[in-house]
Image (cartoon, rainbow, N blue to C red):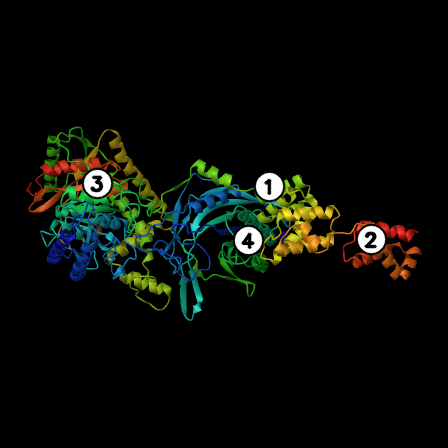
Amino acid sequence: MAATGGWETVIGLETHVQLRTRSKMFCGCSAVFGARPNTNVCPVCLGLPGALPVPNEQGLKLATRAALALGCTVHARSIFARKNYFYPDLPKGYQISQFESPLATEGSLSYLSPDRGLATATIERLHIEEDAGKSLHDRFPKHTAVDLNRCGVPLIEIVTGPDFRSAPEARAYLLTLKQVLEYAGISDCDMEKGSLRVDANVSVRRVGEAALGTKTEVKNINSFAYVEKALLVERDRQVALLESGGSVVQQTMLYDSKSNEVRPQRRKEESHDYRYFPDPDLPPLVLRPEFIAEQHAQLPELPARKRERFVAEYALSVTDAAVLTAERAVAEYYEKVAGAGADPKAAANWVMGEVLADAKDHGERLRVQPGALAQLIALVKGGIVSHQAAKRVFAELAERGGEPRTVAEALGLVQVADSGVLAGWVSDVLGAHTAEVGRYKGGEVKLLQFFVGQVMKASRGKADPKLTQRLLEERLAS
Amino acid sequence: MSDTSDALANARAAADRIIKAKRLNACLTPPKELRSSLLRQAQTVHPSGVLYGMPVAIKDNICTLEFTTTCGSKILEGYRSPYEATAISKLKAAGALIAGKTNCDEFAMGSSTEHSAYGRAVHPTDKARVPGGSSGGSAALVAAGVVPAALGSETGGSVRQPASFCGVVGIKPTYGRVSRSGLVAFGSSLDQIGVLGRSVHDAARVLSVISGRDPKDATCEDRDSLRLPTVPESLQGFVIGIPKEYFPADLDAGVRRASDRALRLLKELGAAVREVSLPHTAYAVPTYYIIAPAEASSNLARYDGARYGPRFDGSLDVRAMYRRTRGEGFGAEVRRRILVGTYVLSSGYYDAYYRKAQQMRALIAQDFRNVFDRGVDLLFTPTTPTPAFKAGEKTADPVAMYLSDAFTVTANLAGLPAVSLPLGRIKGLSIGGQFIGQAFLEDEMLEAAYALERVVAAGDEV
């Protein structure tokens, strides 16, 4: 809930997202994750004397698209600034970022709050920056190793207002943000690879209080699983502190996922005066209106809009539409199945059921061609294969492909609707279960399903269940 | 095509001259290394280039593959760049020979080439005096006839001032005319590679080669290389502005005499000479000494001993390493500017210093635009307030040293092209005058310089 024992939590998030570019933000080096340490480097990202940054066009495009996807005002003129601090994994002694004039401001993102239903987070600013390298403290005893592959990788930082009232709400926003950015092809948003990182500003106040409490910044939340945990731990820490008469100190807290605790960052590590100033190596970033319009045109239909359209166009429930639109590839797949003539509701059930289950076990690949699935759905509707048999056909299509009808026939799964053949199985079943026949005739009519089941078993699933039921009723009534 | 014998002969002769000029302490490259490199270059140099076989000495803050790049600093002792500056690639493509690295004030911070970790460079005609700075080594080598041209760099006059002191030509192009890629940054919004030459023509043809667009520098303009102007018959039609702020009452008498003579000559050449005012000139030096150190404090943060250059290990922790490396690796003047720059960018002081300085910089640039908008083509001023001063004369008084840049920093703050050329001598010491041109109109500026150079008799006492 939003409040615990009269306390309300207030959270704002700063999310760093790695843009999906092939090369780094200010040089031509590969931005790919996982290369051998210090192999994706050049004079520019190593900060060698005399080397100069040149902005990556694709990075600018993706950042602009992100801003537009989040409803931000994209500024025609923004300024790259230097954020100065000393650290061994920061080879220039400063990070290129944006400060006074960011790329975009004043956006918003609607998300489904577990507490309040549909809610809107304000996006205060979105700016471009370069990543720093990585310090590895556990690689060599008593030494710190530095990997500069990540240095200069393009990031955007997305800053919300203090808009979230609980940890689950913050998490819900984050998942929605991830969804939007993945949809628009801006980032792969993989927290484990560090392509999405989140810092949270957390404070608490008495319910009804208008002023914000003193906040802390929680860092080092490096997986989606820990977002809620970290925020709850910090919320609890602050509430306990205040209830025991203490006060919250504005500081940076590091989350430790192993112990599920937060600890203050050492004083020396923070208290930076970053001495931001405009980077004289980079002229003001001027985006022509046509450039911005082009990026707008490149945006796909975003999940919220798509969800609404699925409800209207395919008469789906909001919940089903939400599941189908959660990932862009799945939504597009669903539309192809429905577009190939399948009944939209049946198609939805198939995609949410068999298709997603199969994808989950096979590296998120959607293995059955949408056209084939549409044909399979038509076979079920036409009574050619039973629903149960169709699942086996689906599994075969997933493994080996092929044409649904041919596959069903090859597997011997085409339903038998020949009343002569069915009558034979019905006679066999009734002859073998005379006791049950007696009980049925004595009024225990629910045994009909038992007989249907036995016929299905005898036919190894091939009997048309509706026809079988009718034949059984006729025979048992005589 | 000619064989490489011309280039080889040039290379040998240049090596001999450089070694003979050792007393100037103008060249930092060891003689043996220089000779063997020059001979090697001469054998592989492109024979069809416009600078075929021409030895060009390079200020030691421009990255070269052939030689170390130390910026006159201990903190880059022995540093070899794995890449070369765009200007160097262009010189080589034009057939020039890279004739060693020249002494300079550490990281180009200074006006006398006394602030070099490798000893002071000496004035070519008076060993008690400084050659100017920070490109003092380049100026001294050209003045001594060792090389016909050399690259220098300017942040606040570091090409023109030593050119003036040594009696050679120095061109500072428009900001964005020459790629800064490979020029070790000092004040990035002010830095430009410039050229020192025996004559306007020598300097201009080198500038023409190194100018032009470069995808490696986002501040380099997307323009073709500079076209060389022809020597004009007269300066008929030129309107030359004389900013009164550059002729204060206490101007050195010799400098005034030399400038007055040059003005008479300009009129005789047919130019219309008009007094103008650049009212914010007095603020240029303080403005410059906020912006340049601010940028320097950030640009020089990378020299921390972690990745290259010597490491003065404190072995306690990484902060101790930074402190010792930077404390011992940088000289006093560089440390002073890093401190000043850090201070003016600090929160609480940014608005009072850095932001104010940026506003003043815009006003200084506007002063120039106002004058040019009123029909003035070029400005003419003395390059420096005095001739070359004595070594040690100003090292104890940084502000006195900074004031020797008073007439040059304005062109850097406004991003404008300027050329200094010798006007004459006072007691054997050369006096320089400069034309300041409009942005990217170097050709017009060079025409005026050609015309004046032809008539000025720069070797004469004035």
Task: Report the chain holding disc 3.
Answer: B
Foreground disc of the pair 1, 2: 2
Disc 2 secondary structure class: helix
Q: Are marks 1 and 4 in contact (CB under 8 Å)?
A: no
Q: Relative to the observer, which residue lies in front, A3 or A42?
A: A42
Q: Position of residue B422 (x, y in %)?
A: 12, 42
Q: Position of residue A327 (x, y in %)?
A: 59, 49
Q: Are marks 2 and 4 in contact (CB under 8 Å)?
A: no
Amino acid, disc 1: Arg
Task: Report the chain holding disc 2.
Answer: A
Q: Are marks 2 and 3 in contact (CB under 8 Å)?
A: no
Q: Which residue is mark 2?
A: A422
Residue found 10% across the figure and 34% down from its top: B265
Q: Residue furthest bottom?
A: A141
Residue A203 tag number:
4
Looking at the rendered structure, whether the residues under marks 3 and 4 are on a common chain is answered as no
Q: Position of residue B386 (x, y in %)?
A: 14, 45
Disc 3 secondary structure class: strand
> Can the viewer see residue A215?
no
Q: What is the C-alpha distance between the residues marked 2 and 4?
A: 71 Å
Foreground disc of the pair 1, 3: 1
Quarter-of-image position of residue B288: top left
Position of A322 compared to B217: left or right? right
Q: Which residue is mark 3?
A: B418
Residue A305 tag number:
1
Q: What is the C-alpha distance between the residues marked 1 and 4?
A: 33 Å
Disc 4 secondary structure class: strand
Mark sitting earlier along the chain (1/4)? 4
